[in-house]
Amino acid sequence: MGWMQPHLIPSWSRFVNDAIAKQVSLYPDRFLGAAQLPQNSNASDLSHCVRGARAGAQGARVVATYLSPDPAGQRTTPGMHEPYWYPVYEYCQKNSLPIIVHGTNSLDPRIGIIPQNYSDRLVVEQFIATQLLSTATYSNGIRS
């Protein structure tokens, strides 16, 4: 989604979630779904995504949700240990909905010269997110 204009992201997330629900409904013995949330790096927090998590969780056999540590790919999204993420964390914890952390595109110019930089960028973003989440202390009751 990093290449998308922010006003397109909600519609794209609905489309992707509808496609996931369709695939799961066609092959219920083979697939489980994970909802995509309409993440916006420019928002003050992810409270706008809670509705997407709720809608996704109501889909056909949706058992998780997906979060990108930096959906815009511009390193402008707060670290995954910041309060920006708390609305989604709280919703998912309350509803026993696992979160799949998966890096997306990164426009980090430092590694643009590396031949397989798309894959490297995914690894870098996931590494940063994992380190932030594993060392953070949350003050709002999610983790202490």
Image (cartoon, rainbow, N blue to C red):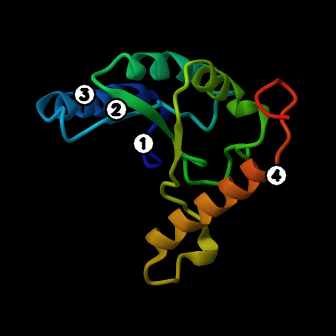
Disc marking residue 4: 1
Decide which of tag 4 and tag 1 comes sooner along the chain. 1
Give the residue at mark 4: 135
Which is more toward the observer, 44 or 62? 62
User: Which quarter of the picture shows residue 18?
Assistant: top left
The amino acid type found where label 3 is placed reads Ala
- Identify which residue is drawn at 58% across, 76% down: 111
The amino acid type found where label 1 is placed reads Met
Q: Where does the image place residue 81, in percent across and percent down from the top left? A: 76, 42
Decide which of tag 3 and tag 1 comes sooner along the chain. 1
- For the C terminus, the image quarter is top right
User: Disc 3 and disc 2: Cα gap in Å?
Assistant: 14 Å
User: Which quarter of the picture shows residue 59?
Assistant: top left
Marks 4 and 1 in Cβ contact (< 8 Å): no
Decide which of tag 3 and tag 2 comes sooner along the chain. 2
- Identify which residue is drawn at 55% across, 19% down: 95
Give the residue at mark 2: 12
